[in-house]
Image: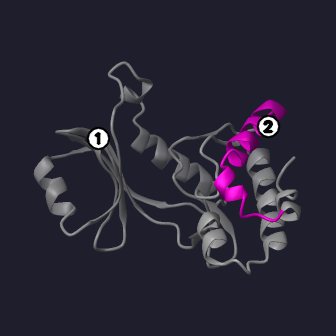
Amino acid sequence: MQSMSSEQFAAMRINAEVIEKDGHGEKVLRLTDGTYLKLFRRKSWFSKTVFFPPAERFAVNAAELAQMGIPCPHIISVFKLNEPYRSVVHYSPLEGITLRQLLNEDPSLEQLELFGMLGEFITHLHELGVYFRSLHLGNIVLTPAGNLGLIDISDMRCLGKPLPKRMRNRNYRHLLRYEKDWALVHPLAASLVRQ
């Protein structure tokens, strides 16, 4: 992970659009060329992120997903800022629309086909050993090619073997806890995803 000065970062983010921020500052920026910067702060000096920063984890996860044929963002570079400390990943976004956006923007959506595909996709992820604690409809993208892919992948592990049942169940609980999303899903379509 290379270091970047505050001046270099300021030059890079000229005219960038702030996509997400919180009380600690900017979290996601869209640059003028359409690429993104995702910034991670260190929440504790005694955290394991000192040795494996979230930006690096994001990049490693992207490489593992790509190797398994799962659509995901394409990593351009990973670097760190010292003032204020942030680990930063620079990436090209995964083209498409999130399932959350689809549900909100297209009430006439053919949900049975889509959620049947989602159920198969999640089963495939579990068979590949992908445990994604941030699995929700806002992090699953339908690509222009009609495939499902993942974004916001820092909170993920690839175990290299099929997930045991307890981890699959935990993953489904994460997915289903977003009641606002699932209120938009027809019960029959939802049943295609639930175990």
Which residue lies under the disc numbered 1?
24
Q: Residues within 10 Å of mark 1 (few under 14, many from 20)?
A: few
Verify whether residue 165 appears in magenta.
yes
Looking at the figure, which quarter contains the N terminus? top left
Q: Give the magenta part as a residue range.
A: 163-186
Q: Main secondary structure of the magenta part?
A: helix
Instruction: Looking at the picture, tell me which residue is in the foreground, 80 or 97.
Output: 97
Q: Nearer the viewer, residue 58 or 189?
A: 189
Toward which corner of the image does residue 119 lie, by quadrant? bottom right
Residue lying at 72% horizontally and 57% vertically, measured from the top left = 182
Disc 1, SS: loop
| Residue at 89% in and 63% down | 188
Residue plotted at (53% across, 52% down): 62
Between the C-alphas of marks 2 and 1, the distance is 33 Å
Residue at image position (68%, 65%) is 148
For residue 7, the mark is: none
From the viewer's perspective, is the residue at label 2 or at label 1 nearer? 1
| Residue 14 locus on image (x, y percent) | 18, 66
Colouring chosen for the image of the structure? one colour
Q: Work out whether 159 lies above or below 191.
A: above
Asked if one can make out residue 129 in the rendered structure from this viewpoint, the answer is: no
Q: Which residue is mark 2?
A: 169
Pointer 2 local density, CA inside 10 Å: few below 14, some 14–19, many at least 20: some
161 is higher (above) or lower (below) than 109: above
Task: Tell me which numbered mark, 2 or 1, is placed earlier along the sequence.
Answer: 1
Does residue 188 appear to the left or right of 162 in the view shown? Answer: right
